[in-house]
Image (cartoon, rainbow, N blue to C red):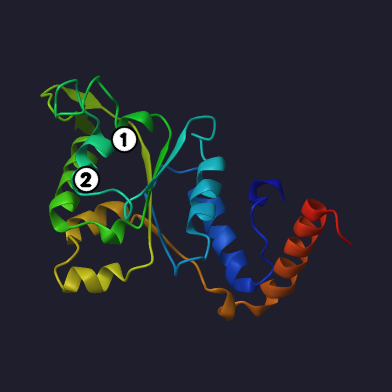
Amino acid sequence: DQPFQDFIAESPLMREVLGTIRRVAPTEANVLILGENGTGKEVVARAVHRQSTRSEQVFVSVDMGAVSDTLFESELFGHVKGAFTDARSDRAGRFEIASGGTLFLDEIGNLPLRLQARILTVLEQRQVIRLGSNHPIPIDIRLICATSMPLTQLVMEQRFRQDLLYRINTVQITLPPLRQRPEDILPLAEHYIQTYCAKYKKR
């Protein structure tokens, strides 16, 4: 099953997930992937990209939890030379680099409200303005977001913008943890045994 070469999944729950990926991938729908840490959210994002009409284009992954507040706008939207002390040349941000392809925003639940507003504006206007510039640059991205945080609860606590959740959540894919799909434990174990036998040349 070539489109899912990164998946080892025999359980009904994961078969359902793969079916959803098959259906949603060829569309342009924004996808929100929910699941605990380690459930394979980026693997799903890459599978959606690989089976999409943008598969020949770039897949850009950004860990939102790892981007500091101060570098956020420069990292995501780019900057022009002289925009701040270390800006020695013009630089495209991740949104611009991903244009034509897929942008994967991992751990979007970690974003503070102020920065959520900035992302929302870019998604609504489909353009970015580099830091230190006032020239808008049009972008064309397929957006996939992921989080291990309960976004609906965060919306109720006013820690996540409802309009942003609405914008990123056209299709939702929830990944079950391994404890809910015991059928996958043995195939996974066998896969890793084979991998490490080959790597360390052991039987």
Q: Nearer the viewer, residue 37 or 11?
A: 37
200 over 73 or under it: above or below = below
197 over 26 or under it: above or below = below
Q: Residues within 10 Å of mark 2 (few under 14, many from 20)?
A: some
| Residue that numbered label 1 is attached to | 95
99 over 191 or under it: above or below = above
Q: Earlier in the sequence, mark 1 or mark 2?
A: 1
Tell me where residue 36 sits by quadrant. bottom left
Query: Which residue is at 56% across, 52% downward?
Result: 22
Q: Residues within 10 Å of mark 1 (few under 14, many from 20)?
A: many
Distance between mark 1 and mark 2 Cα atoms: 10 Å
Where residue 5 is drawn, which disc sits there?
none
> Percent position (x, y) of residue 157?
16, 73
> Percent position (x, y) of residue 88?
23, 21
Instruction: Inspect the image, locate mark 1, and give the three-letter code of the amino acid beneath it.
Output: Phe
> Percent position (x, y) of residue 60?
42, 39
Quarter that holds the C terminus: bottom right
Q: Nearer the viewer, residue 22 or 102?
A: 102
Query: Which residue is at 15% across, 29% downward?
Result: 85
Where residue 119 is drawn, which disc sits there?
2
Q: Nearer the viewer, residue 74 or 202?
A: 202
> Percent position (x, y) of residue 106?
38, 53
Tell me where residue 112 sits by quadrant. bottom left
Query: Which residue is at 12% across, 52% downward?
Result: 114
* SS class, disc 1: helix
Query: Which residue is at 57% across, 66% downward?
Result: 16
